[in-house]
Amino acid sequence: MKHPTQSDSDSPTVINDRLRPVVREGVLEVPGDLDLYHGGHLTGVHVAWRIEGPAGAPIVATLGGISAHRRVFGDKTGEGWWNEVVGPGRALDAALVRVLSFDYLGGSGETTGPRSGESFPGVSTYDQAELLLRLLNHLGVKALHAIVGASYGGMVALAFAERYPERVGEIVVISAADRAHPMATAWRSVQRRMLRFAASCGRAAEGLELARALAMATYRSPEEFAARFSGAPRKEAHGAVFPVEEYLFARGADYAARHQPEAFQCLSESIDLHQVDAGRIFVPTTAVAVREDQLVPVADVRRLVARLAHARLHEISSVYGHDAFLKEGAQLKPAFAAFLGSVA
Amino acid sequence: MKHPTQSDSDSPTVINDRLRPVVREGVLEVPGDLDLYHGGHLTGVHVAWRIEGPAGAPIVATLGGISAHRRVFGDKTGEGWWNEVVGPGRALDAALVRVLSFDYLGGSGETTGPRSGESFPGVSTYDQAELLLRLLNHLGVKALHAIVGASYGGMVALAFAERYPERVGEIVVISAADRAHPMATAWRSVQRRMLRFAASCGRAAEGLELARALAMATYRSPEEFAARFSGAPRKEAHGAVFPVEEYLFARGADYAARHQPEAFQCLSESIDLHQVDAGRIFVPTTAVAVREDQLVPVADVRRLVARLAHARLHEISSVYGHDAFLKEGAQLKPAFAAFLGSVA
């Protein structure tokens, strides 16, 4: 497994600057074996985590898509994966709460994940939830004030709420449901087959470029693409190159330079294996559905909410489709109001 | 170029059986050069065509998607690509009209197309329209009663109507518009990149499997996939295999066994290069839009109809999405009523 560069779990780094929120980072070494929900186990698992916010403030676990990581927000653009929505004074106000996150099991971060060229056992959203539980135990956190999860993170929030209801006050689930939609599984299974094919040609990184390019198309809405990419194609030796194609493959290449194909494979499959029992979730839930989301149709979130014991639904519209959670701070703010209101 | 097995153009095969419609098949050798709309030219082009229906009946050119061919219908299931909609007594009643079709330029049929492992110049829907014109001249057909075109065939119908209005009475355009939607271009450009990548690995047929599997996902609706593919995944050594994935890749493998990667590449690109000027089309047009079509959004067909001089719009609903034209005979029948009514 990768060796994290962070400080170890017994002495988390504490950066206390009067002008800035307290930042703590660390790596939890999970003792013994971690039994996996889909079978098998892992030994020597470590989990890279980060918490940032005013000392003593309530803790909100904040979890994103399969490419998210423990650095949720930062001072500069691009420093955190959710910088447009989370931070001091932002929609999810990190001046009021402490934001906790971790690198996913099986991902490209500093938490245990696949070694290059090797496969990794199937990872469940229940496994991610268990790592979050172990993290709370390690940090001495009796209960989270809330979990805010978007996309894959929303699935992990649901899994945590089903398993450990006494450890979280409420959850906010954005663009996620109790299981994946078969059309979304279709698109992701093509991505995974492309990756496997490319790996079998000894060109895994190029497979990740292709897979990510396809994924990018599913993250946005036809309306956004129509507005941005109506220009004429460029001619190249092998044929035409269309504006939308240049965009998708520029993003694909950028992603492939920074992520591991095997990690993408693992977490992509984890999304499609996700299945929680909504009838067994009693933690108060705010669900946010985006009408233009191609991956998580509004109907699936409505069905989830109808089956939950204590849930309300926010439906929003956004040309960003599934990516709305990264962009629509103002529209998301009301979904955070309940748990932020009680600490303001 | 491939050598067709059909009879040559000077003596078309005539199969006249009193119990069956008259069938004529042939191959037109286009004299001299064929100048291509996107630049360049082809020499020695031949076009494989077929016409079937009662002797002397009005002729309706019937054109389908990029995998369609000159055999539109047959006696047995699977004999023609549009067997569920076209034939004697069917929605497009081949007891009333003669059905003319041809294998597309650049495709996998008996018309001129790419040789294995070689690229082919960019093909325009205007080029296909020109081949249809040459075919009419060859067959001595002054004007078609109608063109019925679905998907790529609808684009060719629009191109023909713009260029040769005196040679067709009306057109029916199903699930096609004046240009491709950038989201559909996004999905197809990923397919073409997958093909090129696989070809560069010396495994072009596997690339076609992947590309076709992705294409299949875009042809249907999320509703249909949700109804058909909600079962649990199978476990394999490399990970989970989902029901929708088995379906897509079974269809992909079947397709790759019967089609040429270079032809798919050529006609896929031709769709994205398609662009006609709706303001210059004066042939009466019936457009059919399918609300669940992911590739050709209803809004694009509405916009097309608003710009056409003489057009009416049929909007239908179908879980088959873009593939509705292959399945929804009863819903399509009213769109054929105008031109069939005048010959009944």
Image (cartoon, coloured by chain):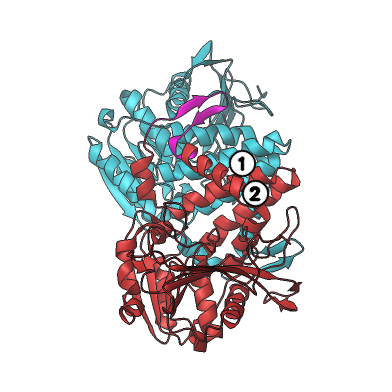
Chain colours: A red, B cyan
Q: Vertically, is B247 above or below A197? A: below
Region of the chain picked out in magenta, as a range? A231-245
- Residue at position x 72%, y 78% in the image: A31
Q: Amino acid at mark 2?
A: Met
* Depth order, front residue of A157/B203: A157
* Depth order, front residue of B273/B25: B273
Q: Amino acid at mark 1?
A: Met
Residue A230 point in image, percent of width and height = 36, 37
Mark 2 in CB contact with mark 1 (< 8 angstroms): yes
> Disc 2 sits on a residue from what chain?
A
Q: Which mark is residue A118?
A: none
Q: Which residue is mark 1?
A: B194
Q: Vertically, is A177 above or below B60? A: below
Could you tell me which quadrant the C terminus of chain B lies in?
top left
Q: Report, in whole angstroms, how far the alpha carbon at label 2 lies from the one at label 1.
A: 8 Å
Residue lying furthest top in this view?
B32
- Residue at position x 70%, y 42% in the image: A203
Q: Which residue is mark 2?
A: A194
| Residue A239 within the magenta-colored segment of the rendering | yes
